[in-house]
Image (tube, rainbow, N blue to C red):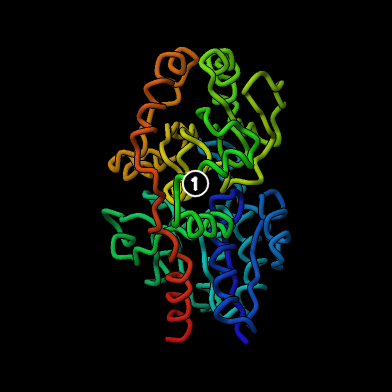
């Protein structure tokens, strides 16, 4: 019986692909054990146990984006985190990392304990944690082609999809038009009215939420239905006309299928799930980080299924001026989804099996 340690915490963008790989691993290796590494502040504390997997917590190494006195703590926090990670990783047959704060100490722990490492990079521009981990392994996989650096030679695996999204992509393939109409009805919206699905990532977006609130009258005047996921930590606006705000969308597969237009951040998971099920998107990349969200959406823009604007361009005036054009573009976009990521989890599992058996 083998033990697979998985490191990918903090946001759903790191956790969901890891969960998809763990589920696929147990499908092909049912007697094995999958253990997740995480920190006490990440979404893994709810998502991993809910999926039925064991979660081991290690201290978080917090690194501010700008220089500050907190940087003096980094060596001490990193040492503590690596020591905690070694206790788990040294007993594992392989470590599979997906980036984020928890992955860096996990990679160092695996290097010290000589545990084989596999890394999956979801973003088109690899993050610092995965670039660090790549120093210790050649077993690399990516969701998008990478132009330079070690990840340019990685396995192009795609991004592992959540089970509900993957299942919806398979079942919808028989009749995409019917699937989209039925999803809209299941969500409680009229089948013959345009639906815009708006979200700002797993935590919501204060910036996007503010613009949407100022645009409710525009949507209602134009007879457009709106499903708005504001984020669990944000105040829930009032339901007005066809505008339906929710703290969180549980039926995400239905939301992707039903929406004629999606307005969202372009995180790696969002782009992948949209690619599988969505029709047309207006992406508003997060204006911090290393610019990966702009790059994540590039292939969807090239395919005529999306456009991208800066956050500063997204205003209520922009919505009022462009919403009709966006919905027209959506009506002209392919009605089918894209199946290119359906086999991603299997590819990463195969790479992982090769890594610890070779």
**Nearest to the observer: residue 214 or residue 94:** 214
Where is the N terminus found, in terms of image quarters?
bottom right
Q: Quadrant of residue 137?
A: bottom left
Q: Is residue 122 above or below residue 19?
A: above
Spot occupied by residue 224 in the image (x, y as percentages of width and height): 53, 22
Q: Is residue 248 above or below residue 109?
A: above
Spot occupied by residue 22 in the image (x, y as percentages of width and height): 58, 69
Evaluate whether residue 68 shows in this view: yes
At 55% from the left edge and 34% from the top edge, which residue is drawn?
191
SS state under label 1? helix
Spot occupied by residue 143 in the image (x, y as percentages of width and height): 39, 57
At 56% from the left edge and 63% from the top edge, which residue is drawn?
20
Q: Is residue 285 above or below residue 345?
A: above
Would residue 226 appear left or right of 304 to someone viewing this image? right
Q: Is residue 105 above or below residue 189?
A: below
* Mark 1 Cα-neighbour bin, 10 Å: few <14, some 14–19, many ≥20: few
Which residue was labeled with disc 1? 178
**Nearest to the observer: residue 193 or residue 5:** 193
Evaluate whether residue 127 shows in this view: no
At 32% from the left edge and 62% from the top edge, which residue is drawn?
150
**Nearest to the observer: residue 219 or residue 294:** 219
Spot occupied by residue 159 in the image (x, y as percentages of width and height): 45, 58
At 40% from the left edge and 59% from the top edge, which residue is drawn?
158
């Amino acid at each position: 019986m083998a033990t697979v340690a998985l490191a990918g915490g903090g946001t759903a963008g790191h956790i969901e692909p890891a969960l998809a790989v763990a589920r696929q691993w147990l499908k092909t290796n049912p007697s094995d054990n999958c253990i997740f590494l995480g920190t006490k502040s990440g979404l893994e504390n709810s998502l991993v146990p809910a999926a039925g997997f064991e979660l081991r917590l290690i201290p978080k190494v917090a690194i501010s984006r700008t220089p500050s006195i907190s940087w003096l703590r980094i060596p001490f926090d990193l040492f503590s985190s690596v020591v905690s990670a070694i206790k788990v990783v040294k007993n594992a047959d392989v470590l599979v990392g997906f980036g984020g704060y928890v992955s860096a100490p996990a990679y160092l722990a695996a290097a010290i304990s000589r545990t084989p490492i596999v890394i999956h990079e979801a973003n088109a521009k690899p993050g610092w944690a995965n670039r660090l981990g790549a120093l210790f392994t050649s077993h690399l996989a990516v969701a998008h082609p990478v132009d330079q650096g070690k990840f340019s030679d990685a396995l192009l695996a795609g991004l592992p999809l959540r089970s509900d999204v993957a299942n919806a992509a398979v079942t919808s393939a028989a009749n995409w038009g019917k699937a989209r109409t039925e999803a809209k009805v299941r969500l409680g919206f009229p089948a013959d009215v345009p639906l815009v699905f708006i979200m700002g990532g797993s935590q919501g977006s204060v910036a996007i939420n503010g613009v949407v609130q100022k645009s409710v009258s525009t949507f209602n005047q134009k007879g457009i239905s709106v499903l708005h996921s504001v984020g669990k930590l944000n105040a829930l606006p009032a339901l007005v006309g066809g505008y339906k705000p929710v703290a969180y969308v549980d039926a995400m597969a239905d939301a992707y299928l039903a929406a004629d237009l999606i307005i969202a951040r372009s995180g790696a998971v969002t782009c992948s799930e949209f690619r599988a099920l969505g029709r047309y998107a207006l992406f508003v990349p997060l204006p911090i980080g290393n610019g990966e969200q702009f790059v994540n959406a590039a292939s969807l823009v090239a395919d005529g299924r999306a456009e991208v604007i800066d956050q500063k361009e997204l205003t209520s005036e922009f919505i009022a001026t462009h919403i009709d054009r966006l919905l027209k573009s959506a009506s002209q976009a392919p009605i089918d989804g894209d199946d290119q990521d359906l086999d991603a989890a299997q590819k990463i599992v195969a790479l992982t099996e090769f890594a610890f058996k070779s």
